[in-house]
Amino acid sequence: MTAGRFITLEGGEGAGKTTQSVLLAEALMARGVPVLRTREPGGSPGAELLRGILLGGTVDWSARAETLLHFAARAEHVAKTIQPALEAGTWVICDRFFDSTMAYQGYGQGADRGFIAEQTRLLGVAPALTLVLDVGEAVAVQRMRQRGGDADRYERLDAAFHDRVRRGFREIAAAAPERCVLLDASGDIQAVHTAIMTAVWTRLGPDQSTDRPGLHQPQT
Ligand code: T5A
């Protein structure tokens, strides 16, 4: 049994992560790759409980407590969902992971970034590839409007917060080029999907390693 591959999608609100994770999963499955799509916060029963607290609650958490709640949810998600899938040879596509904690709690809310980096190290699991979807504020606002629904605790924060989050993601991507690909996600859905398939093929295609399921060159 070959180990699966772990891919995360990151970026600010309305960047198109959910839309693109669905398309990526479909494209990989069409090539015969077993795929599990999941998300954070959440992705396992315990982590989904914490998601409700983090997104819907009214508590004004200290930045460090909020960081640890995200890492508690993540530890549960890794143990119950991500690790077993990878060990079974399934590719895991995750909508947000530890970079979101660095961007939102670290850059956005002012939590100690060294503390977040240490929690990240202690987690002991890292994606093989992180696709960081980048869009400007005007596009993000328009897409959020289009998506509809009630705004969660983070979506209600002001433009300056979301600007810090965006800067955070760009700096995270620049500091880890071996893992991250920063993509301009302001184009149409198909254009962004094509850029994602190119990144996945380039980073995780068959020439890059011998211990993964076959990934055939994308036609998109
Ligand atoms: N959080 C999370 C933290 O603070 N710390 C953490 O550690 C973690 C893990 C999660 C919140 O939690 C915070 C960050 C978040 O605020 P969520 O509900 O999971 O909340 O929110 P998001 O991940 O931000 O999901 P969104 O739906 O807001 O954004 P997506 O998934 O990036 O966007 P998507 O795909 O839903 O698209 C939005 C709309 O735009 C359209 C879609 O059809 C949809 O209507 N769209 C496009 N339109 C035109 N062109 C394109 N290229 C388009 N792509 C999508």
Image (spheres, rainbow, N blue to C red):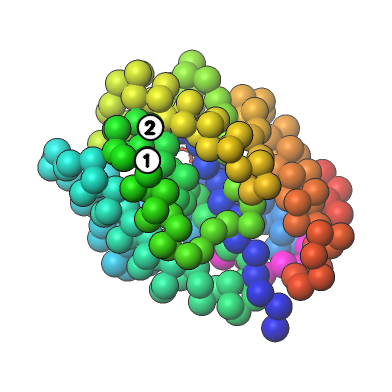
Residue count near mark 2 (Cα–Cα under 10 Å), binned few <14, some 14–19, many ≥20: many
SS state under label 2: helix
- Looking at the rendering, in which quadrant would you find the N terminus? bottom right
Q: Which residue is mark 2?
A: 107
| Residue appearing at x 65%, y 64% in the figure | 5
Mark 2 vs mark 1, foreground winner is 1
User: In the rendered view, would you say 153 is above or below 120?
Assistant: above
Q: Judge from the rendering whether residue 29 lies leftward or rightward of residue 40; answer left or right.
A: right
| Residue appearing at x 29%, y 32% in the figure | 110
Q: Is mark 2 within 8 Å of ligand 1?
A: no
Part of the protein shown in magenta: 31-37
Q: Nearer the viewer, residue 194 or 166?
A: 166
| Residue appearing at x 30%, y 21% in the figure | 158
Q: Nearer the viewer, residue 161 or 93?
A: 161
- Give the amino acid at mark 2: Tyr
- Looking at the rendering, in which quadrant would you find the C terminus? top right
Sequence-first tag of 2 and 1:
2
Q: Which residue is mark 1?
A: 113
Name the spot of residue 212 as percent of width and height, x first.
75, 70
Circles 2 and 1: CB atoms closer than 8 Å:
yes
Say whether residue 189 is visible: no
Name the spot of residue 82 as percent of width and height, x first.
50, 68
Point out the residue furthest to the left here. 59
